[in-house]
Image (cartoon, helix red, strand yellow):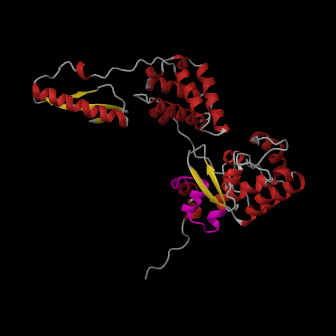
Amino acid sequence: MERIKDTIRLRFRVDGKQQAFYPGLGYTSDNLLRAELLKRQIETDIDTGEFDRTLKRYKVDKPKDNKSLLTAFESFTAYKTKRVEQGTLYKYWALINILKNSKLGNKCYLSVTEEDAEKFVLKLLENAEPITVKDKVCILGACYKWLKAPVNPWVEAQNLIKVTPKQPRDAFSKHEVNMIISEFEDWYPHYLPFVKFAFQTGCRSGEQVNLTWGSISTEFKTCWILSTKTNKARRIPLPENLQELLKHIKPSDAKSTDLVFKTFEGHKVNLNNFNNRYWKVVLETCSIEYRPFYCTRHTAATRFLEAGVSPVAVAQILGHDIKVLMKNYANLIDCPELPQMF
């Protein structure tokens, strides 16, 4: 049994001659079990003289699925709606619009070939940055994986896209953090807890705007985060300054399902509005180079590592894969001096 471009191929000998056969199964865990049963059937038929030399008996009928790529991707987007952050959903909706204006969107998704995917990628690269195109191709690849398609033409298409690594944004310095906090304290005190929490915990912005009081322990010592991005949960220890902050802002009648951070009107914080109306204004007033609000996360990671917090602990707090953390913050993790061994 072999894997050839995400499909299963069987090899066997008949009358001393080796044969290779594609039963029509994509390379998945379920299909591996089906292929194993098929392999045993072929071996038994060869031993008993019942082997079908046309191989028709062993061919798996393809499912009759005529959904267009656009329809299939719309289903995938609907599935993802409650599983990804709002900012990520914009990427899915943008891709839907692209497929609506593309001939490929009307083609049955099972009929899309690697050549089709290649042409689609090259067309996108004419008007968009490589990193943006790669993001879209990765999403389409994830869609095919979710659909359990026997062949995923978007895997090879990713190799066409060469992304030039971008220099990471600088973390805010301690002086800049204090300036930002002071400015919010003076002019926008309502959002001061929101900003302090972001700098102190390094939470993803989407995680923070959805945080409820039920996720904060009764002693205010820990915070339970369920990430929509990774679909994993983690517990964050809260330092004393945040414990006091949360005690101060929690309403006496707060329900476990109530949001911790709200707008002036009591609604969920809209990150785009917050960024444009408050965050940008504060940075400009402080004469600080603009960096988006999610850079508070990068700042927290940097300060944690500089303070000597274990990389494993930092990865757990941020909800990062340890490999990603090591890749992005290697300069802060590397030991500056080797210890003496003798």
Of 306 and 86, which appears nearest the observer? 86
Q: Is residue 45 above or below residue 276?
A: above
Q: Residue 229, image x and y in percent? A: 59, 43
Q: Is residue 320 above or below residue 22?
A: below
Q: Residue 210, image x and y in percent? A: 69, 45
> Is residue 334 part of the magenta span, yes or no?
no
Mostly what secondary structure, the magenta segment? Answer: helix
Of 115 and 188, which appears nearest the observer? 188
Whether residue 3 sits left or right of residue 188 in the image: it is left
Q: How many marks?
A: 0
Q: Is residue 2 above or below residue 220?
A: above
Of 112 and 194, which appears nearest the observer? 194
> Is residue 321 part of the magenta span, yes or no?
yes
User: Residue 318, located in which quarter of the rendered image?
Assistant: bottom right
User: Which residue is most to the front?
Assistant: 253
User: Residue 231, located in which quarter of the rendered image?
Assistant: top right
Query: Can I make out residue 125 in this image?
Result: no
User: Which residue is most to the right?
Assistant: 186
Tell me which segment is drawn in magenta. 303-324
Q: Is residue 334 above or below residue 319?
A: below
On-image quarter of the C terminus: bottom left
Q: Residue 70, image x and y in percent? A: 55, 21
